[in-house]
Image (cartoon, grey):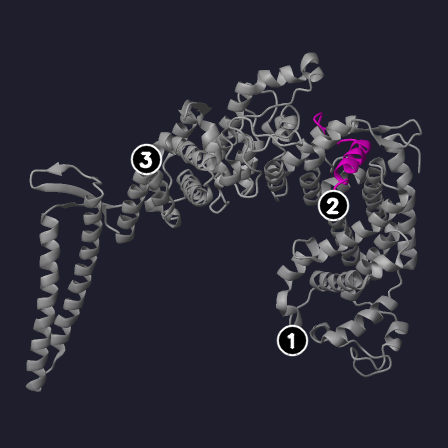
Amino acid sequence: MSFSGVKLPEFDTLVTRHTAAAMQIEELASLLYGELSGAGLDTAPAERIRRLAAQVGQEAEDLRKRQGIVREMERLKISLGPAAATGTLIAMPDSLPQAQGQLDGTAAARAAKATAAGDKNALKQLQAYASKARDPAFVKSFLFQLGAKGVTELPASIAAQLRAAASAGDTGQTSKEAREAMRLLATAVAKGTNPSDPAYMGDAFLTELVKHGRSEFKVNGTSYFGYQAQAMIWRASEGNPPFSEKFMQIVGRDAIVFEKEKFGDRWKASKDAIGSALGSKQVPMADLATVLGVTEWMTPGTPSMGPAKQPVDESGKRLGSAVIDNLFHAAASDAKASQALLNHTPAGWKQSILSYMLTDRLAAFQFHGNTDPFGQALQKALTSNDPASLALTTEAVNTLKEHAKKVFAADDSGKLSIADRKLFDQLSFLRHPMGSALAAHINQVYGTYETESEGFLGSDGRQIAKADMDRLLVLVSGDKDAATEVQAAEAGHMLDTINDAFKANGGKEVDSALRPEARVFGHLVEARRLGLLANAWSDEQARKDMKDTINAAFAYLVGPAGQLGAKVAGGLGTKVGEKGAELGFDKLSEFAAEHLIKVGVTSGEALNTANNQNEMITWLMKSGVTSAKIAAGDWSREAMKAAEGTRFVTGGHPPTLKPMQEIVADPVTFDHFMKWARRYTDIEEITDNSNNTMNTETDTVHGNLGIIKY
């Protein structure tokens, strides 16, 4: 940002004279134009003077706006420059919008300081600047004036005012003002701590946030650590702009380390013989809104206020949020930020933050029951298409498979049972994000079952055992959304395999290519069934759910977020119906598969015509092979003879297919073509073999888990 200095009162004199000059030049131009026009002479000189007058007028208008800003600074007694013998030298950005942002940021900081001092009216003034928080000039001025210490103390002052209003039974307006002010603060801090943002305050500001985060403060007699107040800022973030990777590396990681330093000994005591006997819980460091009992008004949709320091409800969960919950809420809007938190081993630790969250700190998530933030951040970090995501997913798989060994065991009758219900419940919130992660890395899931080295690797560098993956899938698939995503991912993997087989040799070896896919599907669906039965579902309920889940997986596959739906939307779009559009093998096969699956799902064809989930998967295989056959275009004479007289062929005996672009362009023609193609795609033997493979693979799953077949 470039600055120039203005000195009062000389600046006022400059504005007055510049404005007068513009008017005089305009008057001169008008007089000259009249004289030249009246004399029949060229009026170009007058036009040039008029353009000069307009330019001077614009400069005068700019100066008047700057004068207004300077006067506002004077009124608010904001001094941004040194005093001089003849006036005050005020530093002002060369850009007028930057000057206005600087003024607004400084005024907002003054309102913030007044709020911190207990001025009730100042909070209203502060929240009025919420719409300015995206302006870099505003943010830099605001944060510079407040400093990291002021940023840390402000949320406490806001919470204290809200607490007082709640005690008086009047939270309405104060709550609205508090939320807007916190939203302003969250946006400003996110921008000011992001190196790629013009508002970045520099590394020193981040270091100061850490310093004050670890410091102890007081508000209305209640002591708190700075991170407990800063956590309220993180929770107020709406994710746009997100907190940066840099912020999480410096402030976020330290907040996690700090909580462990302060609470680690308590947690150990809660797990020893005495603590366990007394039913002690792993108490996390609560944010200040929870400590003061104002979570309801600081965060919409949360339970009502309880007594200060001890808000509780009848369920036994402590209402509110922990510092780390709020940190992960801030991280969850950005994959790099989430990965920066999880993919790190702090100095002196023997485990990464991810492993720590999934083991030593796991029970702490249950204290407030505020598990969504970590689950969302975990999902964001583990589902990206990058090496860090795969590394984190591999680590999570290795950690959770050990939990799964404790959760599940054979009961007295040899069936699978939940041996550790408490641990099972603690892990429940992780099932959906882990399902998304396994879906994102379906190649490794497939590789674990079908290769020697392309699956998930264990800590010893060797591929994890199939039994470990089965047990983990039973745990994860207990969540229907997780099971849906994993099965949809494997369905997409299978369709890719079919396409590859047809591209390689016209589908001559598609049978052998499909059998491994059938085996993997066998593990996925049986894991879901066993998880339901272990959780006291009846066999009838489980069978119905299995079909419903597969149907949901097919719908997900062709939906906007699904692999096939995304491919068709991104690869073809509206061009598929255009004449002359180029449709290569992959595009045509994907388009045909999407059509077949969508029709099958919406009409209930797959769900209603199949006796069980394996037959539904067989139906999907048929759809995939049919689509690949269409793309390959190698039809028998019998098929072409049957196509005579249809909308999608030209004349001849036998006829020939019209160009595929023409068939696709007309919906009615395309539907007729698809029905014909399904009828004349010889796939019964192939899919029967795959169906048998799936049926027999359940024996393998039962053997891996050490249970009887049932």
- Between the residue at mark 2 and the residue at mark 1, the CA separation in whole angstroms equals 37 Å
Secondary structure beneath label 2: helix
Residue 629, placed above or below residue 351: below
Residue drawn at (86%, 82%), measured in percent from left and top? 653
Horizontal and vertical percent position of residue 80: 21, 39
- Residue flagged by tag 2: what amino acid is it? Val
- In the rendering, which numbered label is found on residue 486? 2
Which image quadrant: the C terminus?
top right
Which image quadrant: the N terminus?
top left
Q: Where is residue 209, by image quadrant? A: top left
Nearer to us: label 2 or label 1: 2
Residue drawn at (72%, 46%), measured in percent from left and top? 481
Q: Which residues are magenta?
A: 457-481
Q: Which residue is mark 3?
A: 113
- Between the residue at mark 3 and the residue at mark 2, the CA separation in whole angstroms equals 51 Å
Q: Which residue is mark 1?
A: 579
